[in-house]
Amino acid sequence: MQGIDRNTITDAVIASFARAQDPRMREVLAALVRHLHAFAREIELRPEEWRAGIAFLTAAAAITDERRNEFVLASDILGLTSLTDLLQSVPGATERSVLGPFHAEGSPLLPVGASLIGDNAGEPVLVRGRVLDMAGQPVRAATIDFWQTNAQGMYWQQDPSQPSDNLRFRMQPGDDGVYAFTTVRPAPYTVPYDGPVGALLRAGGRHAWRPAHFHFRVLAEGFAPLTTEVFPADDPYIDEDAVFGVRASLAVPFLKSDAADDAARYRLPRPFSLVEFDFRMAPVRSAQ
Ligand code: BEZ
Ligand code: FE
């Protein structure tokens, strides 16, 4: 391969992948090379800047283990994780949002109407809604997987003072699709910023805060798995989520309710906060 110069190198690298067996792999690699080279040309990438980029990746690898993945975090704060969610969005279905690192399999299965409050201090909240299909009909045999921080912004995995499985559950709505539970209002928290991603945030003049949120993963046969989040619309960080997970349709009011029947039924003090949120499930995509 002679005659490589600054004008021909991009096509030469793309051509070097021409024999990739899988056409999608060929397409992805060609676009990756095209955009990487365009990036370097646009900023006239200097050798010391290229070395700093490699040092970032090396530091991310060094800090990554089973519990912490700095590459996922880098993808999150660069908006790439959210962009892949947005590219999958189906008009009319509940919008997707990031999974984050605190989901765990095997949360306790609780009945509809269960309380998560226990010894958790904080503002009591009743959360309820339905799991629906695109026609607005209840989805049968759905499973909701839920997790959140406590009122100090900590997940139980980060905080030895919380019992294991605190503020998380799985729930199977009945044939009416209705789910309901009581909990405490979660709090904003920071994504980890003690590693190379933190250094990048600081260099970029950014903070590491996420607005408070509930995490949901809803599964039902025949429907695409839905991973999403629900945010209090009045959260101070609602417009500056470090990982770009907020969508307008997922920012909801935490209404003040004084309803005596709900308070009695769910053993809540009055007033309490009320969050009503329906999930709209998209049908599973046909194989591509
Ligand atoms: C979370 O919401 O749990 C989360 C998402 C992205 C990065 C870190 C945490
Ligand atoms: Fe989270």
Image (spheres, rainbow, N blue to C red):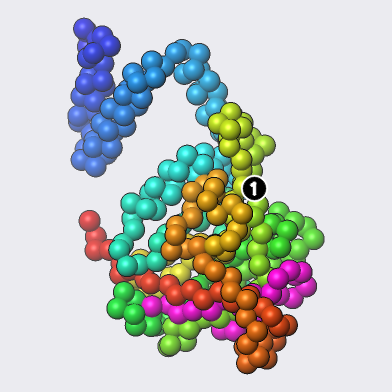
Whether residue 27 is situated above or below residue 170 in the rendered picture: above
Return the x and y of residue 216 as percentages of the image width and height.
Answer: 51, 66
- Looking at numbered disc 1 in the image, what kind of residue is underneath it? Thr
Q: Residue furthest right?
A: 161
Quadrant of the rendered image containing residue 236 = bottom right
Q: In the image, which residues are magenta?
A: 112-132
Q: Which of the two residues, 259 or 56, is positioned nearer the viewer here?
A: 259
Q: Nearer the viewer, residue 248 or 267?
A: 248
- Residue 102 rendering spot, x and y as whole percentages: 60, 56
Q: Position of residue 159 (x, y in %)?
A: 74, 56
Residue shown at 44%/75% (left/top)?
Answer: 278
Classify 10 Å Cα crowding around label 1: few (below 14), some (14-19), many (20 and above). some
At horizontal 45% and vertical 43% (from top left) the residue drawn is 79
Question: What residue lies at 59% left-to-right and 74% top-to-bottom?
Answer: 255
Element type where label 1 sits in the image: strand
In the rendered image, which quarter is residue 118 located in?
bottom right
